[in-house]
């Protein structure tokens, strides 16, 4: 174990058990998964995404580019940073190879959002942010303070002194004052991940991960705060910058500040033989603290002159310090074992189990950049910082390049700044991007396995923009978004191009600052709250009947009604056979319905449909097709003429809203002179097709005063009647080729009428059937489903529906497109049937259709595709599977044999006519 007594803020009085890579370990409340692994001497946590190299933990928070894990319990989550996962009892995780696995079950957690309007928003609860929030609160402003860590204080360890007392005691006092102020909302574990115009900031609060099983069940797991502030103060701190050298990706190499954080926050000593490679003063604090905690520490400072005060303190703490020394290579297999350094006198090899690196600091300018804040290169920092402020936005502290504690405190508190114990004067940082070595082994973006040689290759390919280099190499595109690699990549690119880095600039920082789960962004808008679920009046009956539902155009439609022991295919075959031989009933209430009224209704519909509607007589029904400007079918349905100036248009279930919008667009923008009014009545009418040779008998029993004979009630006509004083409209329409009636009633009475029809049909063996059976019945007759048998490139002629395109009308939408050369191409895909010659294989929808050459072999790849399968079913009537397909010049190829891949084999099928059942149409009249 690598725990050190006397250090850390964890609760050592309680023990948590967790599992990593199949092995059980223990940790404590307050640990992260990374700190608990390091405490158990686990450094190798995974492998890299491209090269399969070992990967460990490189930092203590979200800047870590290496320590990625897959959480398995309590709920599977991929690609999380071990350094940012708070440990809970029973946690199960494993290392990953740069790729994770999504959960295969719905997330049981809940997510929400909250809107907040405030005077001042402070981002970051380090010393600068805490004091800025206190100053604003004391001035009477409403304040929101957000910080991404579990506790306030930022990088303070407690060894510092502010206002004459321990820094952590000072932090606690400020936090208590803020908590007591009702105008202050203080949110820890809350990451501001996006800043936008007009003071708008998005922040993610992690609410229930850290309590684990003790979290309240009614509390959302994460909450997105949508904050609108008059003033935004960004005190987001800075990220320590590494230096690139050979094999700098080995486990056991981490940022110097991270090792110090693990020691003071979690009581973890990450190594016993420690080498610190630095060109900046800050690493000395880590070296001294780790030495004091019991490690043997050597500091290799790249600068020619050591910082005198720090060097003296280091020596007093037993730290060995060398000037003008750089690391050129790390050695080891799955963990660093030694460091090879170059001194003025030559190379030396130093044994080490931990190599800490510090090349200076990069201000966290991401949020400032989100709102197009300008950046300027600061040569002293070796990084970019804000070039000023923006209206309503101020960047302070380390985020603005101020790295000394006294300066940070003054930036937050202004004139009220408490005294800070004197620190050693800063010695200028020596800016080093990399040391000499093998460019192919020098990793710039460790998560992406992107090296210096990748940048050199990009530059050699002529790329001179850092944005282009980023995309060529993928540097900065991983989960950490280049927090440690971005500026280094710019620096190395500038060196290779021989240009100043200030001319090159940085890549563009975009939200989110850290990864945000889609579930959190969705919030409560999931399931029925995201995509509203519409149900018919008969839905409760379908549920009680054990229906299996499918989602169609937001509607819950009964797909089939399985009896005990039946799967879908068996149930559908039974429903099909019962309907074709007796009588079936379908809940077709989801059919789109549009009421069209006005003196110009007929003329309007003539322009919308390809065929004539104005000649339709009152009491009659006509099938129609709508095309887009390109002549391709967009929807179909029936039109009932209700009165001289009134029609009822039906559409596909999924096309109802789209068609209404389409009609309104033409009516309002192209033909405003037409006196026509449109209204959706989809929800107002419940519709029940009663289908099959015995459907007339069922209708006759329910509607005694309605003559349903062929002579009195011909095909494609409708009649109004009533049942117990309730108006009912019956239309004789068939989507199955069988004798059929569509019974329409006000939805209020839908369930009652459904039960009446079922009761009357019981003696005839009436069978409820679902949408899957409806599809089989229509496909057997060659009736297409728009959107399934069409794909936006299909014209009426391709479906063999020339008859539906009027030759009498002067114009209609899409007419001119029918004369285009491509629309007249005989090789266009046409709707045909496919019958597998083995009479048993069901072809898969979407499968491509190919053809053998004359010698019985397939053409050389790429194999030409003749078309694709659009619909495929088992047929009780045919006693075999069949399919519909779009095939090039298909109607001229009836009788030809083609092949369709199924499970790795090519299945032979014969092209046939689309009408496979009752081609004479004799069944339509019973």
Image: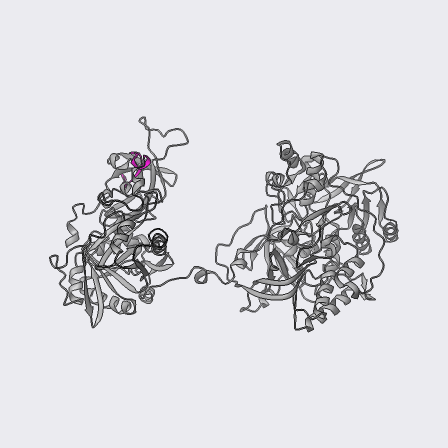
Specify whether residue 825 is painted magenta.
Answer: yes
- Left/right of residue 200 with respect to residue 728 in the rendered view: right
Residue at the extreme front: 673
Locate residue 868, reporting x and y percent.
34, 40
Locate residue 344, reporting x and y percent.
85, 36
**What residue range appears in magenta?**
821-838
Whether residue 892 is visible here, answered yes or no, is: yes
- Name the image quarter holding residue 894: top left
Give above or below for 854 relative to 227: above
Please report the residue visible at 28 percent of the width from the left and 64 percent of the height from the top.
686
Locate residue 99, reporting x and y percent.
56, 47
Give 709 or 763, whichever is nearer the viewer: 709
- Left/right of residue 158 with respect to residue 609 in the rendered view: right
Give above or below for 417 relative to 37: below
Specify whether residue 321 is painted magenta.
Answer: no
- Name the image quarter holding residue 472: top right
- Left/right of residue 891 with respect to residue 270 in the rendered view: left
- Left/right of residue 684 with respect to residue 532 in the rendered view: left
Locate residue 608, reporting x and y percent.
29, 50
Please state, as top left, top right, bottom left or bottom right, where the C terminus lies in the image.
bottom left
Whether residue 187 is visible here, answered yes or no, is: no
Please state, as top left, top right, bottom left or bottom right, where the N terminus lies in the image.
bottom right
Residue at the extreme left: 711
Please report the residue visible at 15 percent of the width from the left and 49 percent of the height from the top.
922
């Amino acid at each position: 174990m690598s725990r050190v007594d006397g250090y850390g803020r964890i609760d050592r009085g309680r023990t948590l058990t967790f599992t990593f890579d199949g092995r059980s370990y223990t940790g404590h409340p307050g640990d992260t998964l990374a700190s608990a692994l390091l405490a158990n001497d686990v450094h190798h946590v995974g492998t890299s995404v491209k090269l399969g190299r070992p990967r460990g933990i490189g930092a203590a928070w979200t800047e870590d580019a290496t320590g990625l894990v897959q959480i398995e319990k309590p709920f599977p989550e991929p690609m999380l940073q071990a350094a940012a996962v708070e440990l809970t009892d029973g946690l199960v995780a494993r290392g990953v190879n740069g790729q994770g696995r999504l959960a295969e079950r719905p997330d049981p957690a809940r997510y929400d959002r909250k809107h907040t309007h405030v005077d001042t928003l402070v981002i970051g609860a380090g010393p600068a942010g805490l004091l800025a929030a206190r100053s604003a609160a004391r001035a009477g402003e409403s304040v929101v303070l957000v910080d991404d860590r579990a506790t306030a204080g930022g990088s303070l360890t407690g060894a510092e002194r502010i206002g004459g007392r321990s820094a952590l005691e000072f932090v606690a006092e400020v936090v208590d004052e803020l908590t007591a102020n009702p105008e202050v909302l203080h949110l820890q574990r809350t990451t501001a991940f996006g800043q936008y115009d007009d003071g708008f900031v998005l922040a993610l609060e992690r609410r229930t991960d850290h309590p684990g099983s003790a979290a309240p069940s009614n509390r959302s797991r994460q909450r997105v705060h949508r904050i609108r502030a008059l003033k935004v103060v960004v005190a987001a701190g800075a990220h320590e910058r590494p230096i690139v050298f050979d094999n700098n990706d080995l486990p056991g190499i981490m940022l110097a500040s991270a090792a110090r954080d693990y020691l003071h926050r979690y009581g973890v000593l990450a190594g016993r033989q420690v080498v610190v490679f630095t060109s900046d003063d800050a690493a000395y604090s880590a070296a001294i603290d780790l030495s004091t905690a019991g490690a043997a520490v050597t500091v290799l400072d790249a600068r020619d002159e050591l910082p005198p005060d720090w060097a003296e303190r280091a020596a007093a703490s037993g730290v060995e310090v060398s000037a003008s020394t750089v690391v050129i290579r790390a050695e080891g297999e799955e963990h660093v074992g030694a460091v090879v350094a170059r001194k003025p006198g030559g190379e030396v090899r130093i044994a080490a189990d931990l190599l800490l690196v510090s090349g200076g600091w990069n201000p966290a300018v991401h949020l400032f950049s989100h709102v197009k804040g300008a950046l300027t290169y600061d040569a002293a920092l070796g990084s970019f910082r804000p070039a000023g402020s923006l209206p309503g936005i101020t960047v302070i502290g380390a985020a603005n390049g101020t790295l000394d504690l006294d300066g940070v405190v003054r930036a937050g508190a202004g004139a009220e700044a408490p005294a800070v114990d004197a620190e050693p004067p800063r010695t200028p940082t020596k800016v080093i991007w990399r040391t000499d070595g093998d460019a192919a082994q020098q990793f710039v973006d460790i998560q992406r396995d992107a090296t210096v040689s990748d940048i050199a290759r990009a530059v050699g390919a002529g790329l001179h923009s850092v944005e282009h280099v980023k995309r060529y190499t993928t540097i900065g595109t991983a989960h950490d978004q280049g927090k440690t690699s971005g500026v280094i990549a710019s620096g190395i690119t500038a060196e290779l191009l021989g240009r100043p880095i200030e001319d090159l600039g940085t890549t563009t920082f975009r939200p989110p600052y850290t990864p945000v789960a889609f579930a959190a962004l969705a919030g409560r808008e999931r399931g029925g709250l995201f995509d509203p679920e519409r149900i018919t009046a008969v839905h409760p009956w379908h549920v009680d009947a054990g229906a299996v539902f499918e989602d169609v155009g937001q509607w819950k439609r009964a797909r089939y009604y399985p009896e005990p022991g039946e799967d879908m295919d068996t149930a559908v075959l039974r429903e099909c056979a019962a309907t074709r031989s007796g009588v079936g009933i379908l809940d077709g209430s989801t059919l789109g319905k549009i009421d069209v009224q006005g003196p110009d209704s007929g003329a309007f519909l003539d322009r919308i449909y390809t065929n004539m509607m104005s000649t339709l007589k009152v009491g009659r029904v006509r099938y129609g097709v709508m095309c887009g400007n390109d002549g391709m079918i967009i929807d179909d349905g029936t039109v009932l003429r209700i009165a001289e100036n009134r029609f009822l248009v039906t559409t596909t279930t999924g096309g109802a809203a789209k068609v209404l919008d389409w009609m309104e667009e033409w009516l309002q923008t192209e033909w405003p002179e037409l006196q026509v009014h449109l209204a959706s009545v989809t929800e107002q009418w419940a519709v029940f097709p009663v289908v099959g040779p015995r459907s007339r008998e069922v209708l006759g029993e329910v509607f005694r005063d309605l003559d349903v004979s062929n002579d009195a009630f011909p095909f494609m006509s409708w009649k109004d009647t009533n049942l117990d004083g309730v108006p009912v409209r019956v239309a004789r329409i068939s989507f199955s080729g069988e004798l059929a009636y569509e019974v329409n009633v006000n939805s209020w009475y839908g369930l009652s009428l459904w039960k009446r029809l079922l009761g009357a049909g019981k003696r005839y063996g009436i069978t409820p059937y679902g949408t899957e059976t409806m599809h089989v019945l229509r496909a057997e007759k060659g009736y297409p489903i728009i959107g399934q048998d069409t794909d936006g490139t299909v014209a009426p002629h391709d479906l063999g529906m020339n008859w539906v395109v009027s030759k009498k009308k002067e114009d209609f939408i899409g007419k001119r497109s029918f004369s285009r050369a491509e629309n007249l191409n005989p090789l266009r895909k046409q709707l045909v049937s496919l019958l597998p010659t083995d009479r048993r294989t069901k072809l898969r929808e979407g499968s491509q259709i190919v053809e053998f050459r004359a010698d019985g072999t397939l053409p050389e790849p790429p194999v030409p595709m003749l078309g694709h399968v659009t619909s495929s079913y088992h047929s009780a009537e045919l006693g075999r599977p069949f399919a519909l397909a779009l095939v090039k010049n298909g109607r001229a190829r009836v009788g030809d044999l083609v092949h369709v891949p199924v499970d790795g084999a090519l299945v032979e099928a014969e092209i046939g006519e689309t009408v496979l059942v009752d081609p004479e149409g004799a069944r339509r009249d019973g």
